[in-house]
Image: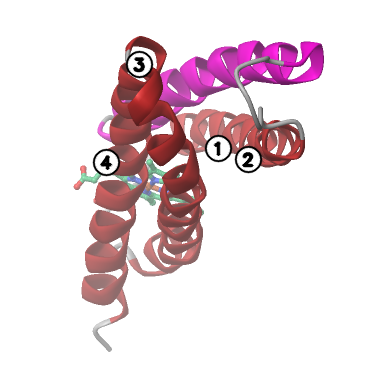
């Protein structure tokens, strides 16, 4: 009863939070690179963005199982498996981002000097952020063909 409709609704909310969150955090990170004053404020708010993205991810996984168990039309199981592999990668990258963010906070500069640890964590964060952005859009692209 209404499982399909609720799952579709939660899947859409999850897509909006996940893809919207990762897009906004990429744009703001690029802004922080150019404007050092904004960088501090943006960095402080990054964990809020991460929470929104994780909330989207959790909603997608829960509603995804709701969809698989309630859709009344045939699904392309090969594509669904490919999608699950990309989602697994996305999860691994998400965990790596979580630990890199923690490392960045731990070594955050107090004055103007940037520590080696902070610079290397920042570089890793940039690479992981780009991979995450690509993976999010890839999952959405694969999903529309299921
Ligand atoms: C990051 C995670 C995910 C993203 C971004 C995502 C995205 C999407 C998108 C964009 C659609 C297309 C909606 C449409 O065409 O109306 C979709 C459909 C679907 N998703 Fe996901 N999804 C995710 C996770 C999951 C998971 C974990 C499952 C299964 C356990 C799942 C199962 C499905 C199914 C079965 C459909 C097809 C529903 C239909 O035929 O209308 N999704 N998803």
| CB within 8 Å, label 2 to label 1 | yes
Q: Residue 59: x and y, percent?
A: 43, 63
Query: Tag 3 or tag 4, which sits nearer the N-term?
Result: 4
Q: Which residues are magenta?
A: 115-144
Question: Dot 4 corresponds to which residue?
Answer: 20
Q: Residue 25: x and y, percent?
A: 37, 33
**Secondary element type, mark 2:** helix
Compared with 98, 140 (above or below) is above
**Secondary element type, mark 4:** helix
Of marks 2 and 1, the one in the foreground: 2
| CB within 8 Å, label 1 to label 4 | no
Quick one: label 2, few (<14), some, or many (20+) residues within 10 Å?
Answer: some
Q: Give me the C-alpha separation between circle 2 and circle 4.
A: 17 Å
Which dot marks residue 30? 3
| CB within 8 Å, label 3 to label 2 | no
Q: Give me the C-alpha separation between circle 3 and circle 2.
A: 23 Å
Query: Tag 2 or tag 3, which sits nearer the N-term?
Result: 3
Query: Tag 3 or tag 1, which sits nearer the N-term?
Result: 3
Q: Residue at x 41, y 30 (%)?
A: 136
Of marks 2 and 4, the one in the foreground: 4
User: Ligand 1: does it lie within 8 Å of the C-beta at label 2?
Assistant: no
């Amino acid at each position: 009863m209404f499982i399909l409709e609720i799952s579709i609704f939660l899947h859409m909310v999850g897509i909006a939070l996940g893809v919207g969150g990762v897009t906004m955090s990429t744009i703001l990170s690029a802004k922080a690179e150019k404007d050092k004053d904004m960088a501090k404020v943006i960095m402080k708010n990054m964990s809020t963005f991460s929470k929104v993205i994780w909330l989207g991810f959790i909603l997608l996984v829960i509603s995804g199982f709701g969809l698989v168990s309630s859709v009344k039309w045939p699904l392309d199981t090969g594509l669904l498996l490919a999608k699950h592999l990309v989602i697994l990668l996305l999860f691994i990258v998400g965990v790596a981002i979580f630990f890199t963010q923690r490392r960045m906070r731990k070594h955050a500069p107090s004055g103007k000097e940037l520590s080696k640890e902070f610079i290397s964590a920042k570089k890793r964060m940039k690479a992981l952020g780009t991979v995450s952005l690509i993976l999010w859009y890839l999952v959405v692209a694969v999903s529309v063909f299921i």
